[in-house]
Image (cartoon, grey):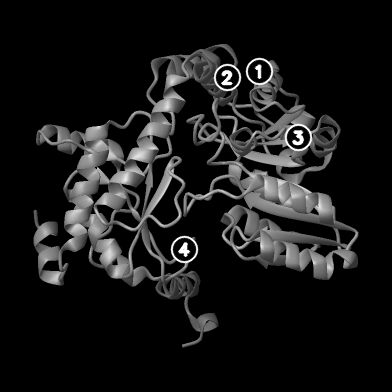
């Protein structure tokens, strides 16, 4: 029966089921760790007298449960309200919006920032809006989905270059730069699936040679890289004003939600009146702006958090390698993948890891090459050495098992 001959709605259900199968829904048939209710899991493990540790949440500086952060959000709700109630452009903004943007600009060392209600939309909207038919966008092949979707709606020509390969980027520019009026190069500051970083000085040398604009998605690097957490530019000792666009998120080190674009004031003033993701979307909730401002204060006043994050990340990588686990090219900065050769094995190890009290869901099919499934771990300043060592010892022991279906079923049965 063709889809048009099905009863109303049933054709959509069949279509969804077909697409789910193509996306790999069969991988979920024997149990999985996705969409886990963390509060319920913590309660269950506490009731059983067992520890529960998450390596799946990007609370890099351990601020998610800080009472000062919670208090700031509560006070903003009571004094300002829950939401912005409209686009800031046409509905007016709250004073705290500008205060947060100025605080973030000072932290990063740039002229200005523009806050948006979605970090995903900050990338998608900027990339899709910036360039025209006479332009070229060169994007690292492992860039985040929000960047890739942005390129799909751009009118510019899009070319991907080999991950972190300055030679590949140089070669493409040498061959094609003369064909375009403007060129934008996009990279990430800390790659969210592999935990490695680009060589910023090399990118700036190529920019001088070939003339292009440089955009860096620093969603995972701000609050993680550099002596004060200001990101990739601070890590390499580069003036952040040398970067044309720095895109960040408020959901990682700043434990809330939303995103921002940082750069030169004249550019951001233009975007305030034209960027679709800002103009046509509601303003950031004031409680989030208050949360971010408080996080910025704590990061400034308590540098031990960043130091602890760096120590924990390096300890995680060294310990994983000592156990014979493959962490790829991870720099040891917040994000560390543990790579597997077999997709089903990766799924099973993650499930058994959760049963042992460690939450770290697998990344398969979506967002990574199909032949490189992994358990991606986010390291926090709040993690202890015992938690890191315990989790990796458990993971290594499970990974060495010949995880057949019988053993898997026995673990699932408790």
Provide residue 245's location: percent of width, then percent of height. 73, 41
Of callouts 4 and 2, which one flags the residue occurring earlier in the amino acid sequence?
A: 2
Of callouts 3 and 1, which one flags the residue occurring earlier in the amino acid sequence?
A: 1
Residue linked to disc 1: 96
Marker disc for residue 293: 2
Mark 3 or mark 1, whichever is nearer to me = 3
Of callouts 3 and 4, which one flags the residue occurring earlier in the amino acid sequence?
A: 3
**Label 4 neighbour load within 10 Å: few <14, some 14-19, many 20+:** few
Provide residue 117's location: percent of width, then percent of height. 62, 36
Foreground residue, 46 or 387? 387
| 287 up-or-down from 330: above or below | above
Horizontal side, residue 227 vs residue 112: left or right: left
Provide residue 79's location: percent of width, then percent of height. 57, 11
Residue linked to disc 4: 366
Mark 3 or mark 4, whichever is nearer to me = 3
Contact between labelled residues 2 and 1, with CB atoms less than 8 Å apart: yes
């Amino acid at each position: 029966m063709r889809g048009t001959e099905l009863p109303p709605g049933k054709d959509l259900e069949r279509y969804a089921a077909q697409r789910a199968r193509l996306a790999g829904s069969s991988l979920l048939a024997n149990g999985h760790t996705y969409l886990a209710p963390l509060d319920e899991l913590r309660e269950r493990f506490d009731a059983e007298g067992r520890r529960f540790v998450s390596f799946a949440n990007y609370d890099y500086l351990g601020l998610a449960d800080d009472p000062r952060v919670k208090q700031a959000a509560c006070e903003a709700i009571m004094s300002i309200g829950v939401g912005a109630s409209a686009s800031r452009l046409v509905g007016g903004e709250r004073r705290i919006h500008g205060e947060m943007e100025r605080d973030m600009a000072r932290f990063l060392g740039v002229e200005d920032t523009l806050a948006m209600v979605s970090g995903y939309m900050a990338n998608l909207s900027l990339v899709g809006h910036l360039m025209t038919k006479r332009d070229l966008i060169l994007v690292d092949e492992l860039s985040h989905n929000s960047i890739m979707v942005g390129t799909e709606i751009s009118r510019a020509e899009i070319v991907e270059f080999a991950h972190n390969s300055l030679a590949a980027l140089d070669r493409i520019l040498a061959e094609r730069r003369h064909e375009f009026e403007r060129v934008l190069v996009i990279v990430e500051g800390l790659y969210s699936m592999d935990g490695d970083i680009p060589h910023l000085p090399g990118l700036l040398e190529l920019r001088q040679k070939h003339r292009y604009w440089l955009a860096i998605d620093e969603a995972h690097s701000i609050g993680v890289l550099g002596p004060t957490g200001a990101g990739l530019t601070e890590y390499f000792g580069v003036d952040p004003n040398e970067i044309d666009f720095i895109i960040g998120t408020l959901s990682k080190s700043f434990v809330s939600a939303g995103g921002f674009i940082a750069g030169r004031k004249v550019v951001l003033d233009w975007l305030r009146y034209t960027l679709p993701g800002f103009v046509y979307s509601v303003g950031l909730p004031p409680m989030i702006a208050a949360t971010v401002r408080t996080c910025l204060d704590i990061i400034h006043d308590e540098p031990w958090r960043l130091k602890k994050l760096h120590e924990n990340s390096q300890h995680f990588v060294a310990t994983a390698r000592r156990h014979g686990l493959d962490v790829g090219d991870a720099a040891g900065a917040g994000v560390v993948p543990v790579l597997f050769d077999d997709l089903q094995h990766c799924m099973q190890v993650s499930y058994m890891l959760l049963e042992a009290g460690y939450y770290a869901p697998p990344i398969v099919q979506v967002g990574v090459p199909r032949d490189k499934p992994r358990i991606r771990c986010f390291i926090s300043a709040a993690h202890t050495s015992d938690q890191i060592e315990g989790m990796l010892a458990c993971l290594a022991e499970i990974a060495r098992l010949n995880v057949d279906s019988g053993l898997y079923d026995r673990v699932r049965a408790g």
